[in-house]
Amino acid sequence: MARLYHVPLSPFCRKVRLTLAEKRIEVELLEEKYWEPTQDFMRRNPAGKVPVLRHDGKMLSESQAICEYLDETIPNPPLVPKNPDARYEMRRLCTWFDDKFHVEVTSNLLYERVNKKIMNAGYPDSGRIKMGSARIKFHLDYMDWLLGQRRWLAGNDMTLADFTAAAHLSCLDYINDVDWSRSSLVHEWYSKIKSRPAFRTLLADQLPGLPPPAHYTDLDF
């Protein structure tokens, strides 16, 4: 069985979990306090980051590299397009969410509200939360624009770009920081992603002392 060292509300870990589930790879989930690194964990990934996936005797790190490796070794169902232009657009959007969205939104909302508490790293910075709340509107509007031209974010087929965006938004939805009324297209897109069997384990996540809002597990939210 594959083994994933992860943090439940990490968008990078969730992206890998979605890919594993979509590929129907059975996996054992092991929570890793990467902010308190052990020697064993640093041997698994000297970068000291999650996710780390042990699969087929290999130790794999970096979420995008892991997901593309899984797609190459288990091609069905495909998450990475074969066409170079479509593959470029998929990778561009994966980077958009894992880089720009993460810096401007996820780190300012999720990390301030949740990670600091878990890590005993002080109080939330209200300025950063305000910034994240403002910037998410821009990103939702950009997603609305993309979905106004396509069935899915990177084109007319679901790709890893959709899982990447959904991983970030699902973490923020857990803490009720997504205004789904802002875009009917984004709401409909997320509803389709959320209804996939691959999403079930994410919806089952529960953080002690931090329950999600009622709509988090509702497929008809």
Image (spheres, rainbow, N blue to C red):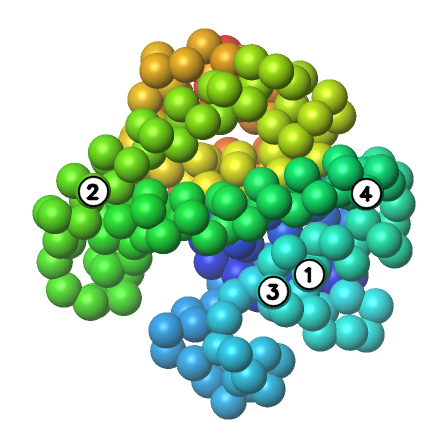
Q: Is residue 104 left or right of residue 216?
A: left
**Which residue is under mark 4?**
84
Q: Residue at x 41, y 44 (%)?
A: 101
Q: Are marks 2 and 3 in contact (CB under 8 Å)?
A: no
User: How much space separates mark 4 and mark 3, taking CA atoms?
Assistant: 22 Å
- Say which label, 2 or 3, has the lower sequence index: 3
Determine the secondary structure under disc 1. Answer: helix
- The residue type indicated by label 1 comes to Ala
x and y, in percent, of residue 213 in the image = 32, 27
x and y, in percent, of residue 81 in the image = 80, 38
Q: Residue at x 53, y 53 (%)?
A: 12
User: How much space separates mark 2 and mark 4, taking CA atoms?
Assistant: 36 Å
- The residue type indicated by label 2 comes to Met
Q: Nearer the viewer, mark 4 or mark 3?
A: 4
Determine the secondary structure under disc 4. Answer: helix
Question: Dot 2: within a 10 Å radius of its alpha carbon, few (fewer than 14), some, or many (20 or more) residues?
Answer: some
Q: Please tell me whether residue 106 is drawn above or below residue 183 in the rendered image.
A: below
- Say which label, 4 or 1, has the lower sequence index: 1
- The image quadrant of residue 191 is top right
Res 21 seen here? no
User: How much space separates mark 2 and mark 1, taking CA atoms?
Assistant: 30 Å
Q: Are marks 2 and 1 in contact (CB under 8 Å)?
A: no
Q: Which numbered tag is attached to residue 65?
A: 1
Q: Quadrant of the N terminus?
A: bottom right
- The image quadrant of residue 178 is top left
**Which residue is under mark 2?**
131
